[in-house]
Amino acid sequence: MNQKRIWALIIFIIGMLYFFIPLLSVFEFSLRALKGIYSFEAYRVAFQDPRFYESFGYSFVWAILTILCSMLLIIPTAYWVHLKLRKIKPVIEFITLMPFVVPAVVLAFGLIRLYGKPPLVLTGSPALLIVGYITLSMPYMYRAVDTGLRAIDVKTLTEAAQSLGAGWGTILFKIIFPNLRVAILSGVFLTFAIVMGEFTFASLLVWPAFGPYMEEIGAMRAYTPQALSVVSFLLTWLSIGLIQRVARGAPGQGQVAGAR
Amino acid sequence: MSRTVTPVNRLSDGDAPKARPPFIKFDWAWLGVTPFLLYAIFFLFYPSASIFVRSFESPEGHFTFQNIINIFNRSDILNAYKTSISISLITSIGGALFGFLLAYAIVLGGLPASLRSFLLSFSGVASNFAGVPLAFAFIATIGNAGLLTRAIEAYLGIDIHAHGFSIYTIWGLSIVYMYFQFPLMVLIMAPALDGLRREWREACENLGGTYLQYWRYVALPILLPSLLGTTILLFGNAFGAYATAYAFSGSFINLVTILIGAVIQGDVLYDPGLGNALALGMILIMSLSMVGYAWTQRKAARWST
Amino acid sequence: MAFLDINNVSKSFNKDTAAVKDFDLQVEKGELVSFLGPSGCGKTTTLRIVAGFEKPTTGLVRIDGKDITNQPPNKRNVGMVFQAYALFPNMTVGENIGFGMKVAKKPAEEIKSRVSELLTLIHMPDFGDRYPNQLSGGQQQRVALARALALRPEVLLLDEPLSALDAKIRVALRAEIRAIQRQLGITAIYVTHDQEEALSLSDRVVVMNGGKMEQVGTPFEIYNFPKTEFVAQFVGVLNSTRAEIVDPANNRLKMDGQHLQTAESMDGYHAGDQVVVAIRPERLSFASDGHKANLLECTIENIMFLGSIVRVTVKVGQYNLFMDTFNNPFLELPKIGDKVQITCSREAVLVVK
């Protein structure tokens, strides 16, 4: 079986090369702002731009809002569906798959056309933005919560709590949520990563989020975009790392996101 | 001495539980899912339906097939579809192939477990790194002043751009897309490969089969639904991608998503009916891929545990 | 000459511990031998060495005189039934059974008739087109058995095939397995941790512990004449207590103040030696039903109704002993807390190391 191992190693190394050369390149590139030497000049420029903080802060706030709304929308739904309305589960799951069928661009298009003119003008406020964000992160938030619910046998927990006299509020907040903590946190961090890096909705709906900011820098400057790219990578790494840290040992982890 | 006794019949009429009227809990539960359903209707179904309907609407507001016909008439739009589909096919099949090999390498390849957990962790990060930052990273790699470009020129004396190669082509973008296609494949296939039971391989060997025969008759057939399904998923993923392409090449590369974006931004092409038709085309293609996906899963349902 | 010769086989996975130590067994043709022991005792490892999935660190395996120690598993003519996930899920029952022949490139007609023959053997003639996920656990294992037999192997290996099944099915299926094995006259090794299974199925039993063979013998021998404390305790329910030798010449012992006489030879023992004494529950009875050589005073602790057997727990000094009597609905049993006398013969008292 040694031959198998050699081939496996070769493939692994090729994979690693493919993944790390771009990372190395972008880092190296970001250090070359000043001719002839390596320096963090590009980073200095990036971090001294007030708009960096504005757009980053903007996206950060929206990430939090998205997370809150998403949780409010999805967790009770997942819980009720799991516990009471099993029959409707396929419908809910189909809905959570819709964002794959209707890509971000198309959805943005539809939302703007529909809600961009009277009687229901939503384009003036960032309402559509949060709609877009929630829709993008919905499949992952739902799947995280659903996996968590399945792993903790909600029915038995609920019935045990009821037999001990607990009301719905107590059940939800003192029993279900704490046990779902890991699953919810996974969904939260993933949503955070998605929103921070999101470009499509923010750009098409014209809101000053971090994604469009990065793209603008890319059009205007050299070297600084790469510095931002490195920052973005580190941020993503942090978010996903947190998920994996939090989810260690918990059942059903390993979140997957797609392209945007 | 007598120790005999008569056995006692312990059976008696038990109490049958009284029938209780069903307790109606429906109010609570439906209240719980209503917000979600409303959200889905207003912000998912309704927009999608309106896209469908308006595709058949002329600028004046009459019913027409013209928008659909225009898609086939206008070469730039046909090209956009061709390009989008090409990139999606390349990156889905290529991503599936190499992604599968990577998953195989870390699960069944006999490599240390640390490599496996590293690749899985990294794949989680890489699949999220898509979009604008990824585009910049590849510009820094194989762009005109990219590290790889310079390295190849310095050590191999080849100027990869001299012969007309540009990264702003289908192949260039495909290489970029692979950065999130490979990890997606690895993340989905690694657990699937894990699901291949040791007993199946041993049973096959025990019955005289070689390793290759095991793969041909047992492992690949079992994995095929996952393989096909994920490939289709990769296709849809690439087809709907916008940010990466936009940041990477702006309008150099003609993609359907870019076109729709252009319509939204009120660029040259401003023609909402056409925009609707483009969007409709996308929805149709994506729906077809979802149907294909469901079909592959159903074929396996016959024998899957 | 033995048909299957497992010759001084040892297996270590790392430097410190040996999974199997000096396993030496000669199996006659047509014999069914069980490997019995707790988890981790090496029984499955030994089986896998015979199958070819593990290579022994030292020792040989021979079948019918041929040394197969270094043969890869797909070249040996042994059939294996696995504990779980035995069948290929993507193939029908018929395709599973015929798989070995398909790999051997046998003609389709021959495969078809052999599959049909085997389906009849396992009493599942109409199941050919079903998929494993449509079968119950017991049915799946029967198909696994048929598949292992399809190529007419020289030796049949079964790795805890019934462990994953319900109790009732286990009992029915093990009788079926034994019947088929007998009918075909095929040499078989059966690995299990269930001593009832081993005792009821086998021609001989190998009791294993910590990689070593503790004892080899017929079920009768293993149960009634255990050679070590481990065997005595593992096989069947057993009362074991500490006792002190009082008078070796007259086979007398003292257990917690009460006297016992054994029929076993006390050669090599001295007065004052501490030994372990074992008595099977069914060898104890109420003294009121008839006196035997040994008499013990005790108190009734518990009475368990097990169906055909009533298991009475009695307290003798510091020890709780089990006593099994046949169920008799017309017989009144003493109550918990009663003081009674129990008795057993001298032969019932086993002295084990």
Image (tube, coloured by chain):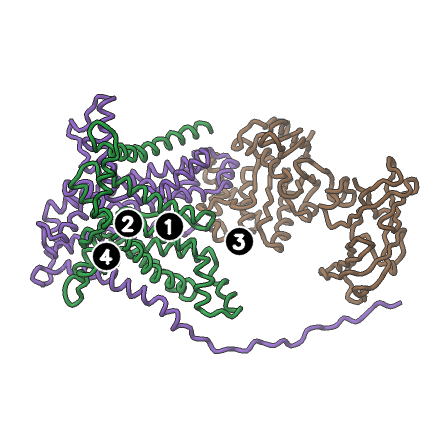
Chain colours: A green, B purple, C brown
Answer whether residue C3 is visible to the viewer in this image: no
Using the numbered discs, state the Cα–Cα distance from disc 3 to disc 1 in whole angstroms: 22 Å
Residue positioned 23% across, 22% down in the render: B154
User: Gap in Å between the C-alphas at discs 3 and 2?
Assistant: 51 Å
Q: Please state if A220 lies on the left or on the right of A76 as rendered.
A: left
Q: Amino acid at mark 2?
A: Met
Question: Depth check: A82 or A207 in front?
Answer: A207
Q: Residue at x 23, y 28 (%)?
A: A37
Under circle 2, the secondary element is helix
Which numbered marker is on residue A129?
4
**Same chain check for tags 4 and 3:** no
Q: Which mark is residue B299?
A: 1
Chain that bears disc 4: A
Q: Nearer the viewer, mark 4 or mark 3?
A: 4
Camera-side residue of A221 and C227: A221
Q: Secondary structure at mark 1?
A: helix
**Residue C31 x %, y %:** 67, 38
- How much space separates mark 4 and mark 1, taking CA atoms? 39 Å
- Find residue C136 and name its label: 3
Whether pointer 4 and pointer 3 mark residues with C-beta atoms closer than 8 Å, the reply is no
Q: Amino acid at mark 3?
A: Ser
Looking at the rendered image, the disc whose residue lies closer to the viewer, 1 or 2, is 2
Badge number at residue A196: 2
